[in-house]
Amino acid sequence: MSQAKDFVILKTKKKYFDCERNKKFLHKKSILNQSKELSDFSKSIGLRIKEIILTPGDDDQNQNQIKTKITVMNDYFSQQKEIFQYLKAKDSSLLSVKHYILLRKSLQGIHRIPSPEKITNLQHKLDKFFELKKDQRGNGYYCLPEQKIKFVCESFLLKNKNFASTNFRIKINIDSTSITSTNLIILNVSFNLIDDVELCMNINGTYLLGSFEIVKEDYEEVKQSLNEFLILLRKINFIKISEINYKIDFFLGCDYKAIRIIYGQRASNALNGY
């Protein structure tokens, strides 16, 4: 069984016009964008968008509006999700606070989602918890790796209560991005939790640890840029969660070019070999 509810995603004073019996909206792009945001958010928290209806207003009091019919499945509204999941869904879908509030009101009695205040408070806590540090060279920022790795592992354990191992496997990714218009080279350091099979190969399972500006892509430059950050990373052997010490095993994940730079080798080409 499932329950359905109409949700007004947008009201507007702009008028429809008829064209061969098909009603078209004057700012279709805006409607599509907002509909996609709502759809992406709903999928993330277990709601299903059934249909989107364009409804012309009859008079000034009943303005044109876009209605979205949401289907709530029993499998989902019987479960309470972590607030963090709602925050992540809201951020990734770019859903506005206005539409979040309207969606929450429309689902009262069917599906409970956290208030905007709880979402905002959690966002502030995470911002403070993952406060960015500026490295001594002044060429980059990073967050404390132990805190972020522990947070991701805790979130994984909440979703996987049957996880029996006392080891976590962390893949560290090092990658550079060249911004040609400004001649900048940005070195990014991120990680994946390999044990989270569903997310470890997904962009949603890649967590940024730091970004550093470098002058050129060679061993000495990368070494100097990452030195301060790597000192903190090397100190992480165990993390304690719920009175259990979990051993952290690190793995390096890069493309072939980055691997050669890390090992002090020149880039692969016809002169340097493979």
Image (cartoon, rainbow, N blue to C red):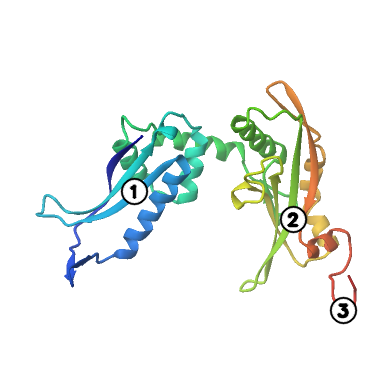
For label 1, the SS is strand
122 vs 91: above or below: above
Sequence-earlier tag: 2 or 1: 1
Can you tell which of label 3 and label 2 is closer to the viewer? 3
For label 3, the SS is loop
Q: Horizontally, is 61 left or right of 145 in the view? A: left
Residue 36, quarter of picture = bottom left
Question: Label 1: which residue?
Answer: 50
Q: Which percent across, then down, holds residue 182?
A: 63, 71
Question: Label 3: which residue?
Answer: 270
Question: Label 2: which residue?
Answer: 174
Quadrant in which the C terminus is drawn: bottom right
Residue type pointed to by label 3? Ala
Quadrant in which the N terminus is drawn: top left
Q: Nearer the viewer, residue 186 or 106?
A: 106
Residue type pointed to by label 1? Lys
Residues packed near mark 3 inside 10 Å, few (<14), some (14 to 19) or many (20 plus): few
Can you tell which of label 1 and label 3 is closer to the viewer? 1
Q: Nearer the viewer, residue 46 or 244?
A: 46
Q: Nearer the viewer, residue 254 or 232?
A: 254
Q: Which percent across, then down, holds residue 172?
A: 75, 49
